[in-house]
C-alpha cells in the first residue's frame, strides 16, 4: 500500500533537513525569508543575486568580475561576469588537489564489476597528462575536440583537459552511429575525435572504433583519432599517422600544460541538441556559464556538498554527463561513474553499486525506474541503501506509480525525489525540487532559484491552474551563447514568439499548492528514454534509402521508455512494401543514430499530411496515429493523408 494518499504531499523536509540544506544557508546569506523572496531579489537586483550565487557555491576566479551581468547586447545575448577570468579545470580539479589531495574525486565501476578510484591529486595528474596528449596532437585554444566515450575515468580527464587547454569539447553519445557523429563534428570542424576501442554492455564487447573510422573518413577537418584502450584493442585497428593510443601518448608526456587563464565568456563546450527541423543545433557554452549553472543547481536543488558521492546514470553525450562532471567536482564531491546497464549481471546491479560505493545522491531517468520495478522489491531490499539521502530524476515526465516506488522502496520515504527539467541549452534546470519544499508525486517545487520561469497561454498571458507554455523572462548564467555559427536559428528557436521571452517548448501546469508539472513537449521533439531526438535526423536517415520518397518521425507513449520512436515512410513509385524492406529501414535508423534510438515500428503509408508549402504536419501524424484530436486542420492541404495514417493505426 502506498505511504501517501493520492493528491497529498508524499515528502516534506524534516527540521534537520531544512536547517542543514545548502539552499537554506543561501537564503540566509541573501536575507530572504523564503523562495518567493529569493525570486523577488533575483528579479529586482540581478547583479547582487548572481554575485551571491557565485560566492555561495565557491567559484574561484583568477580575476574577479567587474559586474555579474551585462545586458548591453540585449536579453538573448546576455553576458555574465564581464571582466572575470576562470577555468573549469581550476575550479573542478586544481584547487581541490591543493586543498584535499587524497579525497576521492572519481569512483568507477565497469560492466564486469572492475573498479578504479582517483583522488583529486591523481585526477590533476591524469587531466594534465590528457591535456599533454591533446597538445601533442596539435590541439590549441579554440580547437574543437569530439568526445565519444563510455563513462570511464579517462572521459572525465579528457573533458577537463580540453578546458585546461582552452579547447572546445564536443561531447557525443557513446552509442551514436557514424552519421550522427559526422553531422556534429563536421559542423564544428573538429580537429580530434577521442574514442574508446570499445566498451562492455551486458557482458559483451561493443566495438566502437569501426564506427569512429567510418565517421573519420567523412570529416575533412579531422586530423586524429585518440583511442582509449578499454577492451585491449590491437594495433591492427590503428591507421598510421592518424590514430594514436591514449595510453602511449599520456605515458610519453613530459611537460605539464598550464591551466589556461580563460575569460568567463570564452567557449569551452558545444553540445549538439536535436530540434524538430534541420540539422542538430550546436549549443555554445562558456567557462562562466555551464559550469556555474551546473554547480548552482547541484548545490541548491540537490544539496550536494564535499561529503557527497553523486551517481547520475547517464552518458557523456547527454547534458547530464557534463553536468555531473562539472558540478560534482567543482563542489569537491566524489563522482561515481557507471559503465553498463542497471540490470546486468542481475536486476540488483544499480542497488549493489549504490551500496558498494556509498552513493548519497542518485539520479536516474524515470525509464530506468520503470524497468527496474518490474523485477519487484526483492532486488532493492537485498541491499543497504542507507547512504542515500537525495534521489534525482531528469529526462522525461513521471507517472505516479513509478515515482512512488522510487520514493518509498529505494528512498525509504525519507529521501526527496528531486525532479529536474531544463535542457542542453539551459545548462541545467528551469524547474526542480529542493530540500525546503514539500513534494507531491511527479511534481516540481518550482523554478530553480534565479530562473524567472512562468506559464503563458497562447496570447502570452501568465496563467495558473491550466496547461500553458513554459517560458523564462530573464537571463541566467548557463543560457547558451547562441548556436554555433547560426545566430538567426538561435533567435528563431527561443526568442521569436514573444519579445524578450525564452519559449522552452514544454507544456506545464501549476496546481493550487504552487507545485509545477510538465505535461509534455509543445514542439515535435521526441524523447526516447530521456534521449532527445529531432525527427529531422530520423527522416534524413530514411530518405537516404533508395526506396523512400518521404518520411516522418514521431514519439508515441511507451510504458518503459516514456516515448518510443515510430517512423512513417512513403515509398517511391514502383517499390513494393515487404517485411525485409521495413527491417532494412529500421536498421538504417540504428546504423545512423545508434541502437538506443531504434524505432518501435516503421509504417508504410501512401502520403503524409502537409501544408500548402509542403511542410509535413507531424502533430497531425501523431494525433491521428494515437486516435487523438488532431486540432486545427486549416493548414492541411491533403485530407486524404489522415485516412492513410488511420489505416496503419494500432488497433
Image: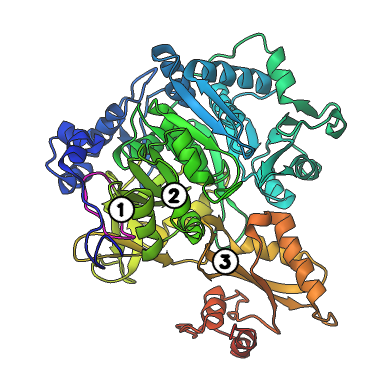
Q: How many angstroms separate mark 3 from mark 1 (CA)?
A: 32 Å
The answer to whether residue 294 is visible is yes
The residue tagged with tag 3: helix, strand or loop?
strand
**Circle on res. 586:** none
Q: Local crowd at mark 2 within 10 Å, few (<14), some, or many (≥20)?
A: many
For the point 33% across and 21% down, the residue is 64
Please say if 610 is above or below 163.
below
Which of the marked residues, 1 or 2, is nearer the chain's N terminus?
2
Range drawn in magenta: 434-444
Q: Find residue 491 and report its horizontal and vertical position in percent.
A: 46, 54
Taking depth in this image into account, of 19 and 625 the one nearest to the observer is 19
Drawn side of residue 259 relative to residue 216, left or right: left
Principal secondary structure, stretch drawn in magenta: loop
Kindly report which numbered mark, 1 or 2, lies closer to the viewer in this rendering: 2
Please say if 275 is above or below 293.
below
Residue behind mark 3: 564
For the point 51% across and 29% down, the residue is 107
The residue tagged with tag 1: helix, strand or loop?
loop
Residue behind mark 2: 380
Q: How many marks?
A: 3
Q: Are marks 2 and 3 in contact (CB under 8 Å)?
A: no
Amino acid at each position: 500500500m502506498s505511504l501517501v494518499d493520492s493528491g497529498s504531499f508524499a515528502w516534506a523536509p524534516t527540521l534537520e533537513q531544512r536547517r542543514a540544506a545548502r539552499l537554506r544557508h543561501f537564503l540566509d546569506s541573501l536575507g530572504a525569508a523564503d523562495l518567493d523572496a529569493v525570486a523577488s531579489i533575483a528579479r529586482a537586483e540581478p547583479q547582487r543575486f548572481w554575485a551571491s550565487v557565485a560566492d555561495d557555491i565557491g567559484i574561484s576566479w583568477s580575476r574577479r568580475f567587474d559586474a555579474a551581468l551585462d545586458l548591453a547586447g540585449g536579453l538573448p545575448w546576455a553576458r555574465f561576469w564581464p571582466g572575470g577570468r576562470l577555468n573549469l579545470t581550476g575550479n573542478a580539479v586544481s584547487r581541490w588537489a591543493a586543498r584535499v589531495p587524497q579525497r576521492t574525486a572519481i569512483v568507477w565501476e565497469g560492466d564486469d564489476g572492475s573498479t578504479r578510484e582517483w583522488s583529486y591529486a591523481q585526477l590533476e595528474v591524469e587531466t594534465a597528462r590528457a591535456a599533454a596528449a591533446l597538445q601533442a596532437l596539435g590541439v590549441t585554444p579554440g580547437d574543437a575536440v569530439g568526445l565519444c566515450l563510455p563513462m570511464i575515468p579517462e572521459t572525465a580527464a579528457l573533458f577537463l583537459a580540453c578546458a585546461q587547454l582552452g579547447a572546445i569539447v564536443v561531447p557525443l553519445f557513446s552509442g551514436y552511429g557514424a552519421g550522427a557523429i559526422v553531422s556534429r563534428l563536421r559542423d564544428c570542424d573538429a580537429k580530434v575525435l577521442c574514442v574508446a576501442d570499445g566498451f562492455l554492455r551486458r557482458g559483451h564487447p561493443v566495438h566502437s572504433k569501426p564506427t569512429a573510422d567510418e565517421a573519420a573518413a567523412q570529416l575533412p577537418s579531422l586530423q586524429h583519432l585518440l583511442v582509449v584502450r578499454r577492451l585491449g584493442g590491437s594495433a591492427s585497428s590503428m591507421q598510421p599517422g592518424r590514430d594514436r593510443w591514449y595510453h602511449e601518448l599520456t605515458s610519453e608526456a613530459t611537460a605539464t600544460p598550464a591551466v589556461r587563464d580563460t575569460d568567463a565568456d570564452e567557449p569551452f563546450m558545444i553540445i549538439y541538441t536535436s530540434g524538430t527541423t534541420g540539422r542538430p543545433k550546436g549549443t555554445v557554452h562558456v567557462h562562466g556559464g555551464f559550469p556555474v549553472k551546473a554547480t548552482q543547481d547541484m548545490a541548491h536543488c540537490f544539496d550536494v556538498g564535499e561529503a557527497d558521492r553523486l551517481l547520475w546514470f547517464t552518458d557523456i553525450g547527454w547534458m547530464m554527463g557534463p553536468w555531473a562532471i562539472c558540478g560534482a567536482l567543482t563542489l569537491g564531491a566524489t563522482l561515481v561513474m557507471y559503465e553498463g546497464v542497471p540490470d546486468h549481471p542481475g536486476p540488483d546491479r544499480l542497488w549493489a553499486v549504490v551500496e558498494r560505493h556509498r552513493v548519497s545522491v542518485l539520479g536516474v531517468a524515470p525509464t530506468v525506474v520503470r524497468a527496474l520495478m518490474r523485477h519487484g522489491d526483492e532486488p532493492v531490499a537485498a541491499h543497504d541503501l542507507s547512504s542515500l539521502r537525495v534521489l534525482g530524476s531528469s529526462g522525461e515526465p513521471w507517472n505516479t506509480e513509478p515515482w512512488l516506488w522510487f520514493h518509498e522502496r529505494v528512498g525509504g520515504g525519507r529521501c526527496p525525489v528531486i525532479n529536474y527539467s531544463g535542457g542542453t541549452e539551459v545548462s541545467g534546470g528551469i524547474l526542480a525540487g529542493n530540500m525546503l519544499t514539500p513534494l507531491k508525486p511527479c511534481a516540481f517545487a518550482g523554478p530553480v532559484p534565479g530562473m524567472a520561469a512562468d506559464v503563458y497561454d497562447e496570447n502570452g498571458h501568465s496563467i495558473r491552474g491550466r496547461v500553458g507554455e513554459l517560458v523564462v523572462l530573464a537571463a541566467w548564467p548557463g543560457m547558451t551563447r547562441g548556436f554555433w555559427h547560426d545566430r538567426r536559428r538561435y533567435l528563431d528557436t527561443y526568442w521569436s514568439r514573444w519579445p524578450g521571452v525564452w519559449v522552452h517548448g514544454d507544456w506545464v501546469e501549476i496546481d493550487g499548492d504552487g507545485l509545477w508539472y510538465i505535461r509534455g513537449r509543445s514542439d515535435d521533439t521526441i524523447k526516447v528514454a530521456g534521449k532527445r531526438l529531432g525527427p529531422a535526423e530520423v527522416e534524413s536517415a530514411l530518405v537516404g534509402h533508395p526506396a523512400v520518397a518521404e518520411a516522418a518521425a514521431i514519439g508515441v507513449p511507451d510504458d518503459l521508455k516514456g516515448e518510443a520512436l515510430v517512423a512513417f515512410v512513403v515509398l517511391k513509385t514502383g517499390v513494393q512494401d515487404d517485411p525485409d524492406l521495413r527491417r532494412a529501414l529500421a536498421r538504417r535508423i540504428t546504423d545512423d543514430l545508434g541502437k538506443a534510438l531504434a524505432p518501435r515500428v516503421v509504417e508504410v503509408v501512401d502520403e503524409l499530411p502537409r501544408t500548402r508549402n509542403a511542410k509535413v504536419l507531424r502533430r497531425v501524424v501523431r494525433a491521428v496515429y494515437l486516435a487523438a484530436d488532431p486540432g486545427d486542420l486549416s493548414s492541411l492541404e491533403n485530407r486524404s493523408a489522415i485516412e492513410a495514417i488511420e489505416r496503419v493505426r494500432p488497433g
